[in-house]
Image: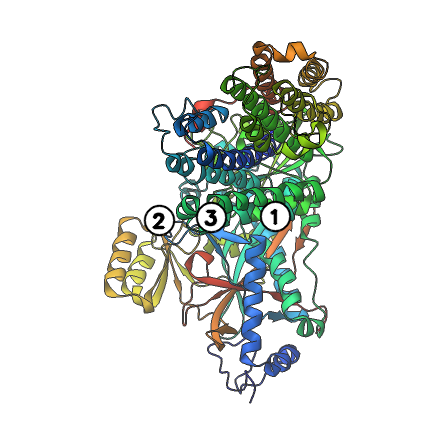
């Protein structure tokens, strides 16, 4: 019997049907993996690790004692998405981003029609930490506010794709999508060769094209830069990677200067005008004049230049209101309101503790629900009811009662599982998917995206900061 | 090119050069102390080394009589900015933020040296086997600078690296000459053979000198050789010539005019000085000042465009 002969999935298994047979689109990979001996597979795992470490593909873990640089484990078994399934996901993502963008445009430079028509409660919008009143009235070329988005998807126990959360500010992870692909073709060349996989390597060119498309009017050969908080940021590798892939400068706040509402970078040939800033710095750190005066990452006067329209920021300022977890339940309604369509990808059932009825339901059922703080990212603060001890649940309930606006609760989604190389054998581990969407004058969904896997047995939390790994994600050209 | 990146590369050049020179001078001093006999006090030799490295003020009150302590300070002390470990560490920090300008080979060489210096028990190695340790440092740096030469495109990035490296080298060579001159009491006096040999060794010029002048060790000739030799890579003239060449290719109608002009003038002053002028103690002093000024002109010309940033806001970094 081969390595996969005794494999048993759990929940919805991506690779195998209920009787343990591989699904059609996994058959060729299954056969190939089944031929390997355990030590051969183990040596390939080592190869991945050494490839990443040598190139410095690492991220920093905040609050961790064991040093600052860690590699993010790439699992040996790729995830495969058939073409027809992907077309469905892609259509759903395009629809969702279009609606979210329309909402932001309506909110910041429109008539706030959705609010006035009662689609989204005004107080909820205005109390959102991501809402930026200073951004009201700031126009963006082509109305492109969500230039780069990452939408987190999960599959329920029937295998249906649902949206778990939207990331419309500075989503990260795309560099792993590209690096994972390069590593995978080196580590499993034969298996890869048995499929026709949609390429992802053009991302840098697509991103640059999208960014240049939204440069301020009148700049014939726009200059694009990537703005990073600096080398100590956990995603610095990705910032440098994207600048390299696009062939543009990676700047820090101190490299930029605003003079008479125009942004320049300091070069060895004096000041050079900047037209588009792909910023990987949060709103509140952008400009110490307009936002946090203690920000050393930002550029004094930047927001005034943005307001004058001499420079474009991607993503736009103030997007955080639309990916606030408390606003998330209203996205399906936005889709119907702005596009007159019904949502292709459903949300996960969500309860809003600020509504008295729902609050008592949440508090009564807190041991069966997942509760999340609305403003956190990276999996921090999430409490999974069925797995939490009494003390944790009590604390979560108290926190919700103290600040109902600050939390949401959701049904537990039994994420799909995927065979994953753990401790010398294949075992089922829960996965999700973060596809990346580029949206400027056109919308482009990058095939696949980042599949994150929870390496701890039974764990539903896939974030890199919480012991997760990743998988290369293959979208097939045809089924 | 971003001014910050240019400045980082300039400093990578300076840090690496300084670390290499420190290793070479330490090596010579260690063995000089062993051979010193009764003529010269070890403490004197060690404090002269600190002076050459511009560190005499920074380590005011440091007891230089124990060679081990100076060696420890200059090789392993990470809290001391002039130590080899600190210099290599800072070169690596700068390399991290300028990766897109460096070839992978350069990055890997710097990173590897840094990791090696962190891994081994350096303190023990520096004490028991100083020669091996310093040789490891030197060859580690040479593999980085060799990779720069062999794999970096000759654009702005490379030029700033070279300018930093050669300016630092010119500073150290001219400073060495000044300190050594005082040590042996002027260049025209018949100096102790061993002293000149040590000076030449510490700038890797001993063999070249022998080939040029045979074993006739004479102060005036050594001075002339280390200042004016067009062929010796550590002569002041050679370093300034390289800087001038780089600055000429970088300067345009509007940029880099001052630093280029100054580089050319200092180079010409060194190149065409008569032997009598070289022997004037003031000549070496002025030369040293001029090279330091040239470095700040480069900074002004290329690294400080636009309005100055509010420095206090950045000190918290």
Seen from this angle, which residue lies furthest bottom? A1
- Judge if badges 3 and 1 mark residues of a common chain: yes
Give SS at disc 3.
loop
Question: Percent from the top left, x then y, of residue B160?
Answer: 65, 30
Label 2 – label 1 distance at C-alpha: 38 Å
**Marked residue chain, label 3:** A
Question: Percent from the top left, x then y, of residue A240?
Answer: 59, 45
Question: Percent from the top left, x then y, of residue A284?
Answer: 46, 36
Relative to B186, say whether A396 is above or below. Answer: below
Question: Percent from the top left, x then y, of residue A236?
Answer: 53, 45
Residue for badge 2: A405
Kindly report which numbered mark, 3 or 1, lies closer to the viewer in this rendering. 1
Give SS at disc 2.
helix
Kindly report which numbered mark, 3 or 2, lies closer to the viewer in this rendering. 2
Visible residue check, residue B155: yes
Residue for badge 1: A241
């Amino acid at each position: 019997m081969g390595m996969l002969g005794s494999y048993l999935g759990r929940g919805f298994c991506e690779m195998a049907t209920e009787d343990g047979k591989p699904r059609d689109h996994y058959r060729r990979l299954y056969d190939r993996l089944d031929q390997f001996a355990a030590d051969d597979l183990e040596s390939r795992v080592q190869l991945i690790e050494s490839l990443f470490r040598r190139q410095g593909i690492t991220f920093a873990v905040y609050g961790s004692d064991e040093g600052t640089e860690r590699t993010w484990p790439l699992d040996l078994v790729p995830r495969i998405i058939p073409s027809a399934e992907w077309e469905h996901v892609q259509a759903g993502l395009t629809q969702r981003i279009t609606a979210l963008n329309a909402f932001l445009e309506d909110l910041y430079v429109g008539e706030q029609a959705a609010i006035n028509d009662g689609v989204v409660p005004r107080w909820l919008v205005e109390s959102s930490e991501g809402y930026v009143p200073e951004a009201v009235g700031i126009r963006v070329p082509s109305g492109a506010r969500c230039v780069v988005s990452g939408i987190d998807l999960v599959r329920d126990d029937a295998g249906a794709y649902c949206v778990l959360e939207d990331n419309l500010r500075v989503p990260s992870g795309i560099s792993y999508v590209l690096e994972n692909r390069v590593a995978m073709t080196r580590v499993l060349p034969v298996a890869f060769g048995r499929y026709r996989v949609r390429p992802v390597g053009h991302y840098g060119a697509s991103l640059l094209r999208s960014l240049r498309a939204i440069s301020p009017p009148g700049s014939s050969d726009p200059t694009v830069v990537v703005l990073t908080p600096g080398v100590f940021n956990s995603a610095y590798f990705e910032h440098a990677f994207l600048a390299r892939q696009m062939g543009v400068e990676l700047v820090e706040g101190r490299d930029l200067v605003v003079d008479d509402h125009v942004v320049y970078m300091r070069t060895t040939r004096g000041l050079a005008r900047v037209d588009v800033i792909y910023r990987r710095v949060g709103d509140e750190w952008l400009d110490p004049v307009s936002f946090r005066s203690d920000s050393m990452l930002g550029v004094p006067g930047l927001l005034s230049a943005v307001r004058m329209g001499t420079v474009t920021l991607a993503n736009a300022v103030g997007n955080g209101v639309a990916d606030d977890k408390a606003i998330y339940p209203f996205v399906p309604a936005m889709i119907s309101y702005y596009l007159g369509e019904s949502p292709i990808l459903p949300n996960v059932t969500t309860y809003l503790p600020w509504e008295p009825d729902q609050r008592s339901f949440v508090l009564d059922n807190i041991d069966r629900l997942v509760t999340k703080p609305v403003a956190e990212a990276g999996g921090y603060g999430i409490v999974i009811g069925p797995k939490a001890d009494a003390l944790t649940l009590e604390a979560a309930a108290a926190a919700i009662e103290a600040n109902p606006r600050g939390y949401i609760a959701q049904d537990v989604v039994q994420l799909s599982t995927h065979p994953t190389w753990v401790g010398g054998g294949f075992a089922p581990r829960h996965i999700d998917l973060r596809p990346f969407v580029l949206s400027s004058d056109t919308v482009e969904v990058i095939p696949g995206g980042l599949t994150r896997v929870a390496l701890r047995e039974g764990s539903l939390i896939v974030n890199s900061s919480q012991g997760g790994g990743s998988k290369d994600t293959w979208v097939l050209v045809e089924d | 090119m971003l001014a910050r990146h240019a400045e980082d590369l300039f400093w990578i050049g300076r840090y690496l050069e300084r670390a290499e020179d420190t290793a070479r001078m330490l090596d010579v001093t260690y063995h000089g102390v062993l051979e010193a006999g009764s003529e010269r006090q070890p403490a004197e030799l060690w404090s002269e080394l600190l002076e050459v490295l511009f560190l005499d003020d920074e380590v005011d009150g440091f007891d230089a009589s124990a060679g081990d302590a100076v060696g420890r300070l200059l090789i392993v002390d990470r809290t001391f900015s002039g130590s080899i470990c600190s210099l290599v560490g800072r070169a690596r920090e700068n390399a991290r933020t300028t990766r897109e300008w460096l070839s992978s080979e350069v990055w890997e060489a710097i990173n590897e040296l840094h990791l090696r210096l962190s891994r081994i028990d350096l303190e023990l190695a520096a004490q028991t086997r100083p020669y091996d340790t310093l040789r490891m440092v030197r060859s580690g740096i040479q593999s980085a600078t060799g990779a720069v030469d062999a794999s970096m495109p000759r654009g702005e990035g490379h030029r700033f690296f070279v300018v930093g490296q050669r300016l630092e080298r010119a500073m150290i060579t001219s400073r060495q000459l000044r300190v050594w001159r005082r040590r042996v009491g002027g260049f025209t006096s018949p100096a102790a053979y061993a002293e000149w040999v040590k000076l030449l060794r510490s700038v890797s010029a001993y063999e070249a000198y022998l080939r040029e002048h045979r074993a006739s060790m004479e102060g005036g000739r050594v001075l002339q050789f280390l200042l004016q030799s067009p062929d010796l890579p550590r002569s002041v003239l050679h370093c300034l010539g390289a800087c001038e060449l780089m600055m000429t290719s970088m300067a345009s109608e509007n940029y880099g005019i001052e630093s280029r002009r100054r580089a050319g003038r200092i180079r010409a002053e060194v190149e065409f000085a008569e032997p009598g002028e070289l022997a004037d103690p003031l000549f070496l002093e002025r030369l040293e000042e001029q090279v330091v000024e040239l470095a700040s002109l480069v900074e002004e010309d290329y690294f400080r465009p636009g309005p100055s940033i509010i420095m206090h806001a950045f000190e918290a970094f």
